[in-house]
Image: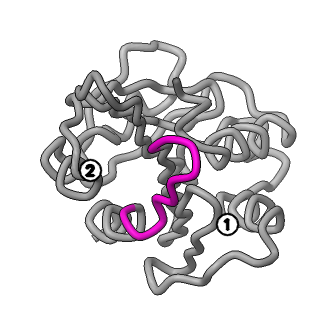
């Protein structure tokens, strides 16, 4: 189902993987944080991407009930929450992935990669993206909204069904998540 959540999460993970990211990255604090269980993580803190939005926020945006979201920490250093519609007649997913500069894998840090550079590499895949007034830089394309805010990259994606354009809803949710 995460594949259905959108192309951007895949591009985010590919951008991080291509640059040599391993699995020992950690994330610093964001709006809400929780301790990581992995002893391999230097800081021991991950971003609680599920705490950025409530199921009610997601339901209001998409007009359908959603679950509480499932949090995962990716090998790339991204923390991701995936919400699924609880309406049995509709298969919809929504996700938020968060990458922080201080959460990048040590191989990325040693190579000099920054979250801003990774954001720009992903943005290059969408030359006709719509610029948004969120964070330091943001754009909307296909079924995603990408926001770079200081040292943090937020990637919001949605799959609402074939032929459904979720950009207006994603813009609304991005404004809530990034604040």
Q: Quadrant of residue 128?
A: bottom right
Q: Is residue 89 above or below residue 169?
A: above
Q: Is residue 6 left or right of residue 13?
A: left
Applied colour scheme: one colour
Q: Is residue 130 left or right of residue 70?
A: right
Q: Name the N-terminal-most of marks 2 and 1.
A: 2
Q: Considering depth in this image, is 179 or 4 the residue closer to the camera?
A: 4
Does 170 appear in magenta?
A: no
How many numbered markers are drawn? 2
Q: Considering depth in this image, is 66 or 111 the residue closer to the camera?
A: 66
- Disc 2 marks which residue? 52
Q: Is residue 19 left or right of residue 105?
A: right
Q: Residue at x 46, y 86 (%)?
A: 133
Q: Considering depth in this image, is 174 or 33 the residue closer to the camera?
A: 174
Q: Taken as a whole, is the magenta stretch helix, strand or loop?
A: loop
Q: Is residue 104 left or right of residue 65?
A: right
Q: Quadrant of the C terminus?
A: bottom left
Position in image of residue 16 (x %, y %): 74, 41
Q: Residue at x 44, y 79 (%)?
A: 134
Position in image of residue 108 (x %, y %): 76, 43
Q: How far is disc 2 from disc 1 in space, using C-alphas?
A: 21 Å
Which region of the structure is painted magenta? Answer: 160-169
* Secondary element at tag 1: helix
Q: Residue at x 77, y 67 (%)?
A: 126
Q: Is residue 78 above or below residue 102?
A: above
- Disc 1 marks which residue? 116
Q: Considering depth in this image, is 4 or 68 the residue closer to the camera?
A: 4
Packing grade of label 1 (10 A; few <14, some 14-19, many >=20) is: some
Packing grade of label 2 (10 A; few <14, some 14-19, many >=20) is: some
Disc nearest the viewer among 2 and 1: 2
* Secondary element at tag 2: helix
């Amino acid at each position: 189902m995460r594949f259905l959540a959108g192309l951007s999460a895949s591009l985010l993970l590919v951008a991080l993987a291509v640059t040599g990211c391993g699995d020992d990255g950690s994330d610093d604090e964001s709006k809400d944080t929780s301790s990581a269980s992995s002893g391999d993580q230097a800081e021991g803190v991950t971003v609680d991407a599920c705490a950025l939005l409530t199921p009610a926020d997601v339901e209001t945006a998409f007009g359908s009930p959603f679950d509480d979201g499932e949090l995962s920490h990716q090998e790339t250093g991204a923390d991701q929450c995936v919400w699924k519609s609880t309406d049995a007649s509709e298969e919809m997913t929504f996700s938020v992935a968060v990458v922080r500069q201080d959460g990048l894998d040590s191989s990325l840090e040693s190579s000099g990669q920054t979250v801003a550079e990774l954001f720009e590499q992903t943005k290059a895949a969408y030359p006709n993206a719509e610029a948004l007034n969120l964070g330091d830089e943001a754009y909307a394309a296909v079924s995603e909204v990408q926001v770079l805010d200081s040292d943090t990259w937020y990637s919001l994606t949605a799959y609402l069904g074939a032929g459904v354009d979720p950009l207006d809803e994603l813009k609304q949710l991005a404004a809530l998540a990034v604040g």
